[in-house]
Image: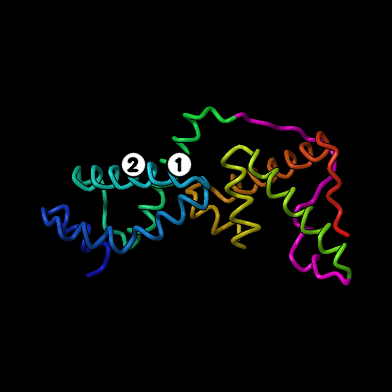
């Protein structure tokens, strides 16, 4: 049976159908959550919240079998993650000064001849990764999906349930914030 058929079986009262759905989807959903929040305990809480919301929505017949059950679950997980971050009252940062282009820093840039250059480049990438953690969650999510998962802005928009323009805007503000953070902390982010 497809995920959609199992979901409809559960709606009709077959609890074993939901057990099968959970078995099929739990690894992917948990991986998505942990990738965003980077905290096992928080990820466990959000994972449970995601499936509680899914159960509630299924029981209230708010799911229409459109052939995209997994995308529906990811959207619920995404909303639960955003709710968690809102509760944490994430600090919003924005500035529009300076030039810094994260796109210019890739693994191919690390292919240098000297071990000193390799170590310096690795440090720059670690610094950038740590700065990404200070971004507001929607911006951080877009940067991670774009540069670490190599997703297109169309794929990012689909995964996060926003428009392509919103994804592009979040990336723009993320880059602005990364530039500002680098400047504030007097970080030289030039690869050797």
Residue occupying image coordinates x 47% and y 48% = 161
- What residue is shown at x 15% (from left), y 60% (from top)? 16
Label the magenta part by its dominant secondary structure. loop
Q: Real-space Cα distance between discs 2 and 1?
A: 9 Å
- In the rendered image, residue 175, in percent from the top left (x then y), is placed at 73, 45
Tell me the residue at 41%/49% (across/down).
75
From the top left corner, tell me how far across and down residue 112 is, in percent.
85, 69
| Most foreground residue, 5 or 182 | 182
Of helix, strand and loop, which one carries label 1? helix
The quarter in which the N terminus is drawn is bottom left
Specify whether 44 is left or right of 125: left
Residue 187 pos. (x, y %)? 83, 42
Q: How many marks?
A: 2
| The C terminus: image quadrant | bottom right
Q: Which mark is residue 81?
A: 1
SS class, disc 2: helix
Q: Is residue 64 above or below residue 41?
A: below
The residue at 12%/57% (across/down) is 14
What range is drawn magenta here? 91-113
Please name whichever residue, 11 or 35, is drawn nearer the observer in this view of the structure: 35
Of the numbered discs 2 and 1, the one sitting upstream in the chain is 2
Horizontal arrangement in the rendering, residue 55 relative to residue 164 (left or right): left
User: Magenta stretch: residue 99 in it?
Assistant: yes
Find disc 2 in the rendering and name its residue. Answer: 49
- Please provide percent x and percent y for residue 29: 40, 55
Instruction: State the image quarter where residue 111 is shown.
Output: bottom right
Horizontal side of residue 145 vs 98, given as left or right: left
Q: Few, some or many C-alpha atoms within 10 Å of disc 1 (few <14, some 14-19, many ≥20)?
A: many
């Amino acid at each position: 049976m497809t995920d959609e058929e199992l979901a409809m079986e559960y709606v009709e009262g077959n609890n074993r159908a939901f057990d099968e759905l959970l078995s099929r989807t739990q690894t992917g959903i948990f991986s998505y959550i942990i990738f965003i929040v980077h905290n096992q305990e928080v990820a466990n809480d959000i994972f449970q919240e995601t499936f509680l919301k899914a159960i509630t929505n299924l029981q209230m017949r708010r799911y229409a079998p459109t052939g995209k059950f997994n995308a529906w679950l990811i959207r619920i997980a995404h909303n639960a993650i955003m709710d968690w971050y809102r509760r944490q009252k994430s600090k919003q940062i924005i500035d529009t000064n300076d030039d810094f282009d994260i796109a210019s820093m890739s693994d191919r840039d690390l292919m240098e001849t000297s071990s000193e250059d390799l170590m310096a480049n690795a440090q720059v990438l670690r610094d950038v990764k740590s700065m990404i953690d200070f971004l507001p969650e929607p911006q951080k999510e877009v940067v991670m999906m774009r540069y670490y998962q190599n997703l297109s802005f169309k794929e990012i928009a689909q995964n996060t349930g926003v428009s392509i323009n919103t994804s592009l805007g979040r990336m723009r503000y993320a880059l602005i914030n990364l530039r500002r953070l680098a400047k504030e902390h007097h970080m030289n982010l030039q690869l050797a």
